[in-house]
Structures are given as C-alpha cells and as structure tokens.
Image (cartoon, grey):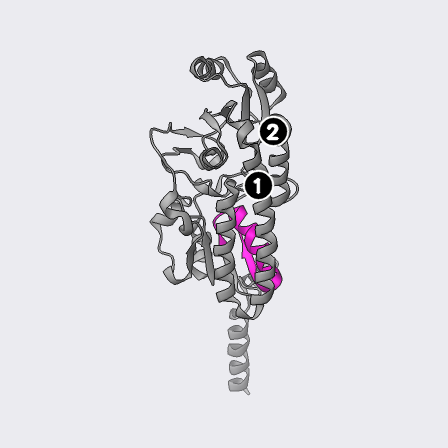
C-alpha cells in the first residue's frame, strides 16, 4: 500500500509539472500562432503597384502580400527579420527593379523565385546624380541618387511590368493560365489608355515649364515631355521662407507656372505658391496603399487632373 501511495504521489507531481506555465500561474494561455500560409501560393511584392497588378491578374488563385507599413515609402523601407523571412519563404517574389528595394542588396533571397518586373526596359533606366540627402516619414535620411525607380508612372513601362507579373504568375499557377491571360489583357488595355491620354497631352505639356514637389517624376517627364525641375517638399508641410527662397532661385531660370505634388498640399502652401504665380496639381505616384480607391482609380484621377490643368 505504501508503495502504491508513493507511486501515485510521483505521478501526480509529474503531471503537475507538465501543465502549461500559464495554467500554473493562473494566466490565460497564449493563442497558438496563426499559420503563415493560407494554402494558396504566396506572392510577396516590393510595392503597392505590384500588389495591385498581381491581385488584378491572378484573382483568388494566389495570396498576394505587401508588407511595408502604410504611410512609409516602400523604396526606403527596412523590413524586420520576420518580413525578410516571409520573403525568403515565398513561392514568388515580385520586385520592382531599378534599385527600388534598397534592403534587398543586404539579404539573400532565393534567385529562382525573384522576378525583376522592370527587366524588359532595364537598358532604358534613368540614372540620377547629385541628388540631395533628405528625410521624411519614419524611413530616415536618404537620397534619390542612383537609378530612378518610380518606373510605373510611365504607363507604357507599367504595362510591361504587368506583363512580367502575368508571365511569372502563369508559371506559378498554370491551372489559372486562361484567366490570368484574360485579366492581364484587361489591365494592359487600361494602362495603354492612360498612356494614350497622357501622350495626347504632350504637345500642351511641352509648352509649360513645371516644378515637382519631389524628385520621383523622371519617367513621367521623359515619356510625356515634361520640362521639369524638382524640389524636396512634403505635401503636408507648410512652406517656410527657406523653401520659398529656394523655389524663387529655381524660378529665376525656369519660368514655371505649375507645381506637381505627390499628394494634396496644405491650403497655406497652395496660397503661398499662388502668390508667386504658381498653381498646384496632384499626380500621386501611389507607391503605397492609397487612403481611398485603388491604383487604377488613383492613376485615372492623376490623368484627369493633368488634362484639366493643361488642355
């Protein structure tokens, strides 16, 4: 009997030791981590335009993930270890190319899964030199030196990037090839329509020297004939005397009458520019998820704003 009691006591102690720590302390047990995959092929993307292209083209055939935080420029985003691991474990990685994702040079990604969506026009990229180092948002100080990377606001290049996305998705999910092809053609038709509308504006745009709030419009300027000089302003920052004096220096040799903004500028900034004889128009590059609408609705609004201003 003593032996039975001893064995029972040992078993009870052992079972108590196997209980979760939360149960021993009276705290609720932590929820089990959610599996990273939905069962669909995982497609990770470098920016929002590629997210839009992939979702529009593949539909529900894949899960598209864009990890950069909203409000941060994905071109200068620094992913944490978890985000890098997600990229490394993806079934397909859609990169913008043109030196877009600075972080990618410092990590190892599986080459067989990486697609440079701007490779088709890689020999026609624009090199930027002598750009000023500046900072905005949580990304810290950076410079736009190197390769100009806002490739998709040349809508002809955007259509080529969409085709690269389509080709990669067709290989990833061959069973959805027919719907991918149909969706790709519909997307490219819309991009080509935007390209035609902007091209039709070229003869008007060439007559108007312009200033841009940020040096991100290189491909827009080249494709559609913009005579453009850039400053380093944020739409939500009210212009101070230093900024206005810098602008006056530009205007002395560049008789612009319009400022292109990445986003809606503050009322005070618009009024200060108007006092210098400049009107404001918004052309949002839409590198990150917009507050409303989607990539296509933003681009259509951009083109409509340009048509209204310059036609």
| Picture disc at residue 211 | none
* SS assignment at label 2: loop
Residue at position x 48%, y 37% in the image: 223
Question: How many residues crowd mark 1 within 10 Å: few (<14), some (14–19), many (20+)?
Answer: some
Report the label total: 2
Q: Which residues are magenta?
A: 44-67
- Chain-order first, disc 2 or disc 1: 1
Residue at position x 46%, y 42% in the image: 151
Q: Quadrant of the N terminus?
A: bottom right
Relative vertical location of residue 16 with respect to residue 158 in this rendering, above or below: below
In this orientation, which residue lies closer to the viewer: 179 or 271? Answer: 179
Residue 197 among those drawn in magenta: no
Image x and y of residue 22, in percent: 57, 60
Question: Which is more foreground, mark 2 or mark 1?
Answer: 1
Image x and y of residue 42, in percent: 52, 61
In this orientation, which residue lies closer to the viewer: 204 or 277? Answer: 204
Residue at position x 53%, y 69% in the image: 174
**Residue denoted by label 1:** 196
Relative vertical location of residue 158 with respect to residue 126 in this rendering, above or below: below
Q: Quadrant of the C terminus?
A: top right
| Picture disc at residue 264 | 2
């Amino acid at each position: 009997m003593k032996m039975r009691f001893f064995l029972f006591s040992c078993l009870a102690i052992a079972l108590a030791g196997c209980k979760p720590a939360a149960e021993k302390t009276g705290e609720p047990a932590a929820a089990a981590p959610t599996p990273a995959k939905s069962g669909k092929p995982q497609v990770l993307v470098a920016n929002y335009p590629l997210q839009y292209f992939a979702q529009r083209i593949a539909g529900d055939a894949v899960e598209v993930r864009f990890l950069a935080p909203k409000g941060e420029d994905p071109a200068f985003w620094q992913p944490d270890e978890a985000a890098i691991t997600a990229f490394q474990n993806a079934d397909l990685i859609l990169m913008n190319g043109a030196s877009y994702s600075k972080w990618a040079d410092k990590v190892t990604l599986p080459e067989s899964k990486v697609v440079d969506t701007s490779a088709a026009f890689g020999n026609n990229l624009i090199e930027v030199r002598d750009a000023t180092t500046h900072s905005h948002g949580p990304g810290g100080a950076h410079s736009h030196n190197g390769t100009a990377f806002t490739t998709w606001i040349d809508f002809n290049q955007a259509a080529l990037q969409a085709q690269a996305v389509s080709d990669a998705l067709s290989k990833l999910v061959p069973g959805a090839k027919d719907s991918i092809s149909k969706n790709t053609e519909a997307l490219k038709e819309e991009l080509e329509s935007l390209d035609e509308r902007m091209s039709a504006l070229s003869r008007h745009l060439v007559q108007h020297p312009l200033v841009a709030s940020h040096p991100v419009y290189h491909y827009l300027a080249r494709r559609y004939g913009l005579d453009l000089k850039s400053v380093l302003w944020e739409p939500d920052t009210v212009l101070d005397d230093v900024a206005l004096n810098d602008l006056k220096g530009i205007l002395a040799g560049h008789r612009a009458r319009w400022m292109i903004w990445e986003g809606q500028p503050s009322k005070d900034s618009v009024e200060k520019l108007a006092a210098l004889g400049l009107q404001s128009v918004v052309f949002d590059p839409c590198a990150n998820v917009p507050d409303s609408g989607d990539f296509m609705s933003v681009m259509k609004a951009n083109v409509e704003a340009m048509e209204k201003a310059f036609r």
